[in-house]
């Protein structure tokens, strides 16, 4: 029984020394960690959505066999180019 309690104490000490637990023991560190995590998530979402939407708009603008979709895609590309050329 004593050896099991000693093993449990050693395991709890090991877990308390873990980086995840150390971050959550301090409120300022926890807030900073979560802020950085949220900023990275937002940046990744923004970049990923931008790349996917621009690729989708370019693909749609290349479709010329369906007049409505091709014209719609070309108009999207013209608006994107006009927005990037504007100061």
Image (cartoon, rainbow, N blue to C red):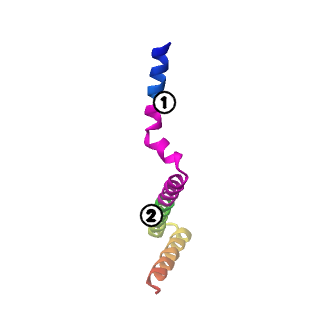
Can you name the residue that lies furthest to the bottom here? 87
Q: Is residue 21 magenta?
A: yes
Considering only vertical position in the picture, is 41 above or below 73? Answer: above
Furthest toward the front, the residue is: 2
Q: Residue at x 45, y 27 (%)?
A: 11
Q: Which of marks 2 and 1 is in front?
A: 1
Report if residue 40 lies within the magenta region.
yes
- Image mark count: 2
x and y percentages locating residue 61 in the rendered image: 47, 70
Quarter where residue 19 is shown: top left
- Label 1 Cα crowd, 10 Å radius (few <14 / some 14-19 / many 20+): few
Badge 2 or badge 1: first in the primary sequence: 1
Q: Which mark is residue 61?
A: none
Q: Identify which residue, 5 or 29, lies in the foreground.
A: 5
For disc 2, the marked residue is 51
Residue 22 picture location, percent across and down = 47, 44
Q: Position of residue 2 (x, y in %)?
A: 48, 15
| Mark pair 2, 1: CA separation | 46 Å
Q: Is the magenta stretch mostly helix, strand or loop?
A: helix
- Asked whether the residues under the numbered discs 2 and 1 touch, taking CB atoms below 8 Å apart as contact, a structural biologist would say no
In this rendered view, identify the residue nearer to me: 51 or 22: 22
- Where residue 3 appears, as percent x and y from the top left, is 45, 15
Q: What stretch is highlighted in magenta?
A: 13-41
Residue, far top: 1
- SS type, badge 2: helix
The relative height of residue 38 versus residue 20 in the rendered view (above or below) is below
Q: Mark 1 points at which residue?
A: 12
Q: Which residue is drawn at 47% across and 36% down?
A: 16
Label 2 Cα crowd, 10 Å radius (few <14 / some 14-19 / many 20+): few
Q: Give the SS element for disc 1.
A: helix
């Amino acid at each position: 029984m004593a050896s099991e309690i000693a093993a449990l104490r050693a395991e709890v000490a090991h877990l308390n020394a873990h980086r995840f637990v150390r971050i959550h023991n301090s409120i300022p560190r926890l807030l900073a960690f979560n802020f950085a995590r949220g900023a990275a998530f937002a940046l990744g979402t923004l970049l990923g959505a931008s790349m996917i939407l621009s690729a989708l708009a370019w693909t749609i603008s290349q479709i010329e066999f369906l007049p409505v979709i091709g014209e719609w895609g070309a108009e999207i590309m013209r608006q994107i180019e006009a927005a990037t050329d504007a100061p």
